[in-house]
Image (spheres, rainbow, N blue to C red):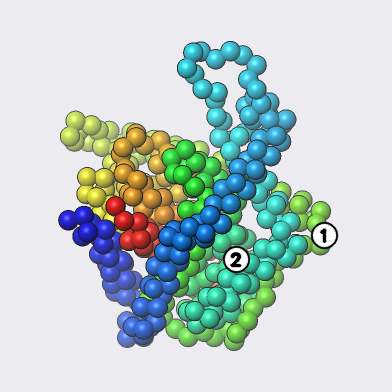
Amino acid sequence: MAALHNFQGLIGIAAILLLAWGLSENRSARPGWLWIGGALLAQIAVALVVTRVPLVWTLVGFANKGVAAIETATLAGSSYMFGYTGGAPIPFLLKPGEQPPVIVAFQILPLIIVFSAISALLWHWRVLSMIVRGLSWILRRSLGVSGVVGLAGGATIFLGVVESPLVLRAWFARMSRSELFTVMVLIMSTISGAILVLYATTLSKTVPNAVGHMIVASLISLPAAVLVARLMVPGEAASGTGHAEPELHYESSMDAVIRGTMEGVTLVLAVIGIIITVFALVNLVDQVLAFLPVVEGAPITLRRAFGWLLSPAMWAIGVPWDQAPAAGSLMGTKAILNEYVAYLDLAGLPAGTLDPRSLLIVTYALCGVANLASVGLIVSTVATLSPERRPEVAGLGMKSWLAGNMVSMMTGAVIGLVTWS
């Protein structure tokens, strides 16, 4: 039984691929079996190499130390600006056993601002742009994608929902429908560097080496996103780009720092606004659901409803059935509301709710920005950059949301396959 449990995720992977093909705009034009097998193999290979080769995982682990250094540096700035609410020593005595308060807006969210500025500076110095070009080359050589899709895949690892399209602005008018959808799914299926730091810091006490795991999750999601996108919207490349160069430029190092900081501030304000709104909406829905009869000794809540609805899906990707309701609740929260809220809920779960393997599967399955708010962001951004594609991108918005969640769940299933228990 234990051996069968280790391969449970194959059920989820098969179901996701069948669903993607079933929702295809042209089922007869699906990619060849050899290409599909290669894309699946690429996901498993990345997961195996990174998690099972000690040297590679050690190198990835340096990212955790880097984030810890950035966190320490950020607290120096936030404590100066916000005092003890930003991390400075508290000016009063705590009760015995009481911990200092952690105020998310003043101690954790400033990480986004600092990392956004550092990312812009590294882009201007061509460090990140060289890494993006390298990832683009790997995707083009391994999966045969066009230059613009390869560039999108590399950029989404570091840039967010709004910033990634800016790198591709020159090609939106020339992309085929298939390329456009693939770019949208790539954006939906990964998380940017600044958001990665925020989420990993939130999970640092729950998931060891959270930064490394989230980097791996985005890498596994790249071939998965291309695979699911090609099954749902098949087609040939039409942009004519065997190689594409990023369009993002800064005038100087100081310009990069200033613009990166301002982009980070905008993102922090957006995160604060979304979190406040999401928690308020959840509370309103729960107040309405409170009028329904009590089930199993507890009132029905939105999170419980998500758990019931998505339990079979989470079981299929490798989570044991007794833990599937908790995992389904988190996945529903991520898909409908926001992945940061889901990670906050994950960090707040009682000890023992998820076993270590299930915790890892869920962490990977939540690692993507495919939520309803992101649909509006990506549609409005691409439509602004290429007004002539507005009707088309609007029509693909919800489809990219569904595909993005399918991809992140497939990524969770893959990490479950290589994590034996």
Q: Which sits in the foreground, 264 or 64?
A: 64
- Which corner quadrant holds the N terminus? bottom left
User: Is 21 left or right of 160, judged from the image as shown?
Assistant: left
Determine the secondary structure under disc 2: helix
User: Is 354 left or right of 241, judged from the image as shown?
Assistant: left
Considering only vertical position in the picture, is 153 above or below 79?
A: below
Q: Which quadrant of the view contains residue 228?
A: bottom left
Residue 71, label in figure: none
Query: Would residue 265 be visible to someone looking at this image?
Result: no
Residue 155, label in figure: 2
User: Is 173 left or right of 35, judged from the image as shown?
Assistant: right
Q: Residue at x 60, y 46 (%)?
A: 65
Task: Give the labeled residue for mark 1.
Answer: 252
User: Is 349 left or right of 62, judged from the image as shown?
Assistant: left
Q: Residue at x 57, y 70 (%)?
A: 135
Q: Which sits in the foreground, 325 or 397?
A: 325
Q: At label 2, which amino acid type do we have?
A: Ala
Tally the numbered discs: 2
Q: At label 1, which amino acid type do we have?
A: Ser
Q: Which sits in the foreground, 168 or 153?
A: 153
Query: Would residue 253 be visible to someone looking at this image?
Result: yes
Q: Residue at x 48, y 73 (%)?
A: 182
Q: x, y (%) of residue 84? A: 64, 24
Disc 2 to disc 1, how far (Cα)? Answer: 21 Å
Considering only vertical position in the picture, is 299 above or below 30?
A: above
